[in-house]
Amino acid sequence: MDTHDRKVIVWTGTTSGLNFLAVEQLLVKSAHSHGAYGSHFRGKLTPESIEKFRRHSAENQERRTSVSSKSSTGSSSTIETPRLHLILALRDPSDEHAIDALQRFRQLAEQSGSLVEGIGCDLMSFRETRIFASKVLAKNLDISTVVLGAGICCWGPPSFTEEKCEMGMTVNHLSQWLLVALLSPRIKDRVVFVGSSLYKNADLRGVMSRTKNTKLVGPVPKAISYPATKAIQALCLGGWAKFFEDTNVDVILCTPGTYR
């Protein structure tokens, strides 16, 4: 299958937590739509369950073929999840969690003819973010969706990136803002910011005037809080909506709740 036949999604923060589960379920739905799993998917994915799914693959494929051969005038109540091309931004592709996540995603993708690839992208660095974006753009693909799910919590005294920016603000907001800007010429459908309801608890006093050249200039003696970074992310949505207003791109803020 030509890679241009798949729906392209660029996604950050997929090796753990809610984003990992979301990618997993999206691939399961794609496999279900294309006849690989049918009604046989239950619970968490394991090597044993994957083998079980494969044994049922031929049966489900036959059923799907039978359904698709019916009169084209008939209607369907099922919304098909397309085959996907997932481009995952990985902080460290050699990390054990990243390797395990890619292996699981690729096992699922195999069932529907989807494609999953991981590309290094350390959001602590604007330079690395630019390199990642250039690699994505070099593929010359229309990007259906960009999902910005990466996030870190910083504690104690502030830490700074190579660009002299506070680390939590860089990863949770600035680098992902930069990534959307760089990819914007190829984005066709939507940009999804994964926010947090914790932004309601944010204290933004002094955040924007907090540091200069790694020296504290504001009254806040600790790292910028996670809620504050998510609040600033949400405050920028109006700007992104304005940026994309002459296109068909939707800008969405998703606040999925707490993951335990």
Image (cartoon, helix red, strand yellow):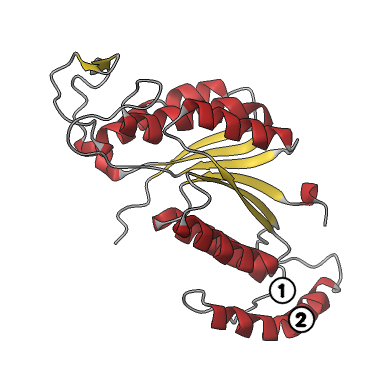
Q: Residue at x 57, y 64 (%)?
A: 103
Front-most of residues 254 and 20: 20
Circle count: 2
Q: Residues within 10 Å of mark 2 (few under 14, many from 20)?
A: few
The secondary structure type at the circle numbered 1 is: loop
* Picture layout, residue 184 above or below residue 98: above
Q: Is residue 6 left or right of residue 29?
A: right
Image coordinates for residue 79, horizontal then vertical, percent: 65, 61
Across and down, in percent, residue 160 comes to 31, 27
The amino acid beneath tag 1 is Gly
Q: From the top left corner, tell me how far across and down residue 120 is, in percent.
A: 55, 42
**Front-most of residues 80 and 77:** 80
Q: Which residue is mark 1?
A: 35
Task: Judge depth for marks 1 and 2 and give the one in front.
Answer: 1
Give the residue pinned by disc 2.
63
Q: Is residue 29 visible?
A: no
